[in-house]
Image (cartoon, rainbow, N blue to C red):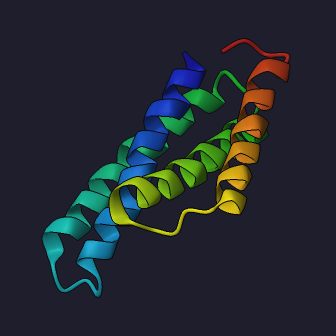
Amino acid sequence: MAWLCILFADIFEIAWPFVLKWSAPLSRWAPFFVVIVCAVPANYLLAEAVKRLPAATVYASFVGIGTAGTAAVGMLLFGESTNIGRICSLALIAAGVIGLRFFSNVTG
């Protein structure tokens, strides 16, 4: 359950940077409102996950998945640079999150 909370929190985490980009420089309020709407459930889900898993594991996993997911969305949907170094770096982040999942002594 805790890992699902982290995963769903990251869906919100991945969405808001792109919406924030569209609202810059805060001249359009609708996208900025979406950023707030994404941030609130993400933080709630993290609070739920940290009840069952160590805070360091939750936060490291959240940041790793969010970073890799944001980069992947940027590459796939927004034409951001794609090269072997970037892809290998994202794979290392994914491996780290998988390691945290399987080598944590706490079930969640």
Residue sitting at 33 percent across and 74 percent down? 21
Residue sitting at 50 percent across and 27 percent down? 5
In the rendered structure, the answer to whether residue 50 lies left or right of residue 46 reads right
Q: Does 83 sit above or below residue 72?
A: below
Identify the image quadrant of the N terminus.
top right
Q: In which quarter of the image is residue 62?
A: top right
77 and 1: which one is in front?
77
Identify the image quadrant of the C terminus.
top right
Q: Does 28 sit above or below residue 61?
A: below
Residue sitting at 63 percent across and 26 percent down? 51
Q: Position of residue 14 (x, y in %)?
A: 43, 51
Q: Does 20 sit above or below residue 68?
A: below
Furthest residue in direction top, as rendered:
107
Total number of numbered labels? 0
In the rendered structure, the answer to whether residue 70 lies left or right of residue 51 reads left
In the rendered structure, the answer to whether residue 23 lies left or right of residue 49 reads left
Residue sitting at 59 percent across and 43 percent down? 65
39 and 81: which one is in front?
81
Q: Where is residue 6 in the image (x, y as percent from the top left)?
A: 55, 33
Q: Where is residue 95 in the image (x, y as percent from the top left)?
A: 76, 36
Furthest residue in direction front, as rendered:
84
Q: Where is residue 15 in the image (x, y as percent from the top left)?
A: 36, 53
In the rendered structure, the answer to whether residue 3 lies left or right of residue 70 reads right
Q: Quadrant of residue 94?
A: top right
